[in-house]
Image: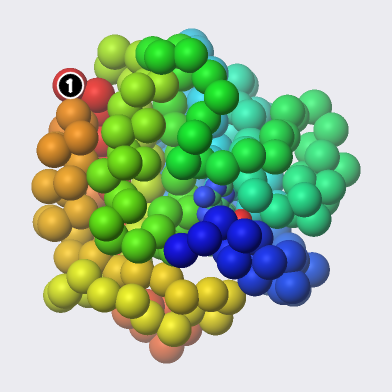
Amino acid sequence: METDTVRQAYTSVAELYISLFGTSQQVHPDDLAFIERHLTGRTGPVLDLGCGPGHITGHLRALGVDATGIDLVPDFLAHARAAHPNVDFQLGSLERLDVPDESIDGILAWYSLIHLPPQELDGVLKEFRRVLAPAGRLVLGIFSADEVGAFDHKVVTAYRWPVDEFSERLTHAGFQEVERLPRPSDDQHRPHAAIAAIVV
Ligand SMILES: C[S@@+](CC[C@H](N)C(=O)[O-])C[C@H]1O[C@@H](n2cnc3c(N)ncnc32)[C@H](O)[C@@H]1O
């Protein structure tokens, strides 16, 4: 999907998105613990790619992580900068990162790969692998399903994956999964999963 389409879609709901999801208290505690487990205590820079309102970037920074947020949507970045003035937020796309090879210690892509058409995933994972240092860590949130396919996400078309198949894509790109947190659907949520992987 064109990044312009994604940018426009999130811009049109930015205020609502921020009110519904824009603080770390609104993140499921198990998810927050998963993210903290894998991305705190790292010495080098961590990129929160597709950071949205910047609440997780700010949370990581408060825990001592050298975290930077990157997103396509100026309205999210304006909010993020106001809410977390001690954090660097940059306008950009996770598909082309303006950082040198092997210069990043961790990447968080928390539900920000969901709008990528499946055929574009390998290229993005290759870019993540390029910038991550040896032993760097990648943490992702995805929607899960029995088959790869598009669904009618509330903001703009998104894709869901069998978690095993997504993990195989990670392996193919030079990562090894180290932890998975699957969660079944409930009244309010589709099935989804968190995955942590290391560079191999
Ligand atoms: C479902 S929201 C998740 C936002 C945030 N990570 C959170 O947990 O609330 C998806 C985010 O990914 C961003 N995004 C989608 N595609 C992107 C891309 N190619 N480059 C940068 N950001 C992207 C969107 O602008 C949006 O902020």
Residue 17 sits above or below residue 36 on the image: below
- Furthest residue to the right? 82
Is 141 left or right of 80, judged from the image as shown? left
Whether 183 is drawn above or below 103: the answer is below
In this orientation, which residue lies closer to the viewer: 92 or 145?
Answer: 92
Residue 22, position in %: x, y? 69, 58
Q: Residue furthest bottom?
A: 187
Residue 101 position, x and y percent, is 41, 14
Q: Residue at x 60, y 20 (%)?
A: 66
Against 88, residue 177 (above or below) is below
User: Residue 5, how many percent across, how many down?
Assistant: 59, 66
Which of the 4 image quadrants contains residue 133? top left
Residue drawn at the location 14% of the way across and 57% of the way down: 165
- The residue located at (42%, 71%) in the rendering is 158
Q: Is residue 114 left or right of residue 146?
A: right
Residue shown at 29%/13% (left/top)? 134
Quadrant for ligand 1 reads: bottom right
Total numbered badges shown on the rendered structure = 1
Q: Is residue 123 left or right of residue 146?
A: right
Q: Is residue 28 visible?
A: no
The amino acid sitting under disc 1 is: Val
Figure coloring: rainbow
Please tell me which residue lies in front, 106 or 184: 106
Left or right of residue 155: residue 31: left
**The C terminus sits in image quarter:** top left
User: In x, y percent, where is residue 62?
Assistant: 67, 30
Within 10 Å of disc 1 (Cα), the crowding (few <14, some 14-19, many 20+) is some
Disc 1 on helix, strand or loop? Answer: loop
Residue 199 can be seen in this image: yes
Residue assigned mark 1: 200
